[in-house]
Amino acid sequence: MDERTSLTVVLAAGEGTRMRSSRPKVLHTMAGRPLIGHVLAAVGQAGGRVAVVIGPGREDVAAAVRRQVPGAEVFVQAERRGTAHAVLAAGDALARPADDILVVFADTPLITTATLERLRGAVAAGAAVAVLGFRPVDPTGYGRLVVENGELRAIREEKDASPAERMLTLCNAGVMAFDGRRAKAILERIGDRNAKSEFYLTDAVEIARAMGSNVVAIETEEDEVRGINTQAQLAEAEAVLQRRLRQQWLDAGVTMVAPETVFLCADTRLAPDVVIEPYVVFGEGVVVEEGAVIRSFSHIEGAHIVRGARVGPFARLRPGADLGEDVHIGNFVEVKAVVIEAGAKANHLAYLGDGRVGEGANIGAGTIFCNYDGVAKHQTEIGKGAFIGSNSSLVAPVTVGAGAYVATGSVITHEVPADALAIARGRQVVKENRASRLLQMKSAGKKKPVHAAD
Ligand code: UD1
Ligand code: CA
């Protein structure tokens, strides 16, 4: 079907007041991506031009659209007068020829490219209008598909439906495809004589039939067309998407012991033979290469992890954590914007922020890269094979040369040259038999009367 030209109109002018949130509905996220981003991804894979209809003053939605699809045309529906009215707001995009025109809702984020292709296929086969239907567990609020003798006659909005029509179980998912040559004529005939005094896109079915055109319904699963109107529905859709993403990575050869406890992002990239233990959360921008192991309770975002690396349990990788081959990042270690070269290890309790750790270096427990001076961030460079003793503070900007040795408990403020030993801590003083005397002095002091001024 690639030789056929397509236009997709994404309707996003809804306010979504039932989310009880100051954020516009379509910018709420699922698997780290805004709802409208999921729809645009499915649309993008189907190909063709994209037009998005937003509400007035929604520069934030327009920006999100342009970030993901720079070539998208954005239109403003000045007044919210119904779904057909919203489609016509994209008039300039409709005016240019297309073989088919898809209409999708930005608050229906689980839609797949395959289903959009099925609708386009129905139009290619001669239908003037193809409607996506589904059988929800609870049809309340949805438009009902009125099918007689196997033919789609009409879509009745719940508010306008007769009691008999309300008993129908096949509902309108909201996704429709139009034949590009007939779309405009159909859309322009839609009126607003209904319970809501809105221009209903659903009226297209009866109008197309009256024009003698062919109309078809295509069915899909409820999970693909869940609309998001409330926070609870957002959470349900997230669960559906997480199941999909886990399945996708299991199919690709990733091992997950308890997939239902692993949370993925839409853009997470995993390779075959990656092992993910239970309870791992992936934020945006993570790439994990073949054979890496992510142990339980790790939180990972913006990180690149290569072959043989071991992360966690209880590790936190933040944007710019770049782990080389066989690197080990252990429990309670936080890494941000640090390149860690092959074979280096930080196995316990450390903060590594802004810098580089050379090949095979060993970072002791409790090491801190003191990267922030209250105003700016500075770099810490650790050379190949260096050893950083436990509980050391490296005050950036600072460099530790290759093969250097930093003694435990040091506060390093100056460069440590290659192969040097740096000890930067108070010398130990031992005073024989002084412990009990010290305690006696302290308890005597405690018995003194306490003055109000204290
Ligand atoms: C719509 C359908 C209904 C279907 C349901 C599926 C119509 C008349 N009804 O009802 O048959 O079962 O979706 O979820 O089409 N929008 C605009 N501008 C407007 C009105 C709506 O952009 O003036 C956008 C909304 O942002 C939303 C979409 O269109 O993305 C659907 O609008 P909504 O008001 O949620 O329609 P429903 O009543 O759910
Ligand atoms: Ca809706």
Image (tube, rainbow, N blue to C red):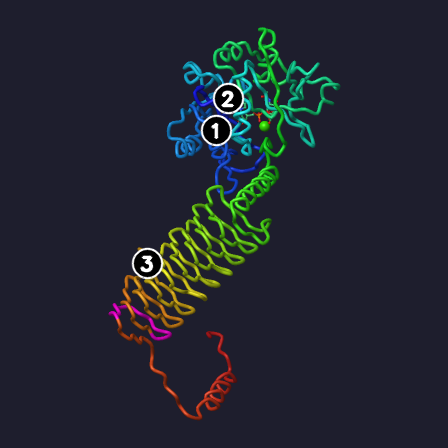
The type of residue carrying mark 3 is: Gly
Instruction: Name which residue lies at 58% across and 17% down.
Output: 200
Does 171 sit left or right of 163 as displayed?
left
User: Which comes sooner in the sequence, label 3 or label 2?
Assistant: 2
Instruction: Name which residue lies at 31% across and 75% down.
Output: 424
Relative height, residue 406 to residue 108 (above, below): below
| Front in this rendered view, residue 83 or 445 | 83
Instruction: Name which residue lies at 47% across and 63% down.
Output: 332
Q: Position of residue 13 (x, y in %)?
A: 50, 26
Relative height, residue 329 to residue 122 (above, below): below
Mark seen at residue 102: 2
To which quarter of the image does residue 410 belong? bottom left
The magenta stretch is: 407-418
Callout in the foreground (3, 2): 2
Kindly report the distance in space between the C-alpha atoms of the residues bearing marks 1 and 3: 40 Å
Instruction: Name which residue lies at 38% across and 57% down.
Output: 324
Q: Which residue is mark 3?
A: 355
In the rendered image, the residue lying farthest to the bottom is 433
Relative height, residue 277 to residue 411 (above, below): above
Does 227 sit left or right of 65 as displayed?
right
Q: The residue tagged with tag 3: helix, strand or loop? A: strand
To which quarter of the image does residue 149 belong? top right
Q: Position of residue 196 (x, y in %)?
A: 61, 18
Q: Are the two marked residues, 1 and 2, in contact with CB atoms closer than 8 angstroms?
A: yes
> Is disc 3 surrounded by few (<14), some (14 to 19) or many (20+) residues within 10 Å?
many
Kindly report the distance in space between the C-alpha atoms of the residues bearing marks 1 and 2: 9 Å
Mark seen at residue 43: 1
The type of residue carrying mark 2 is: Leu
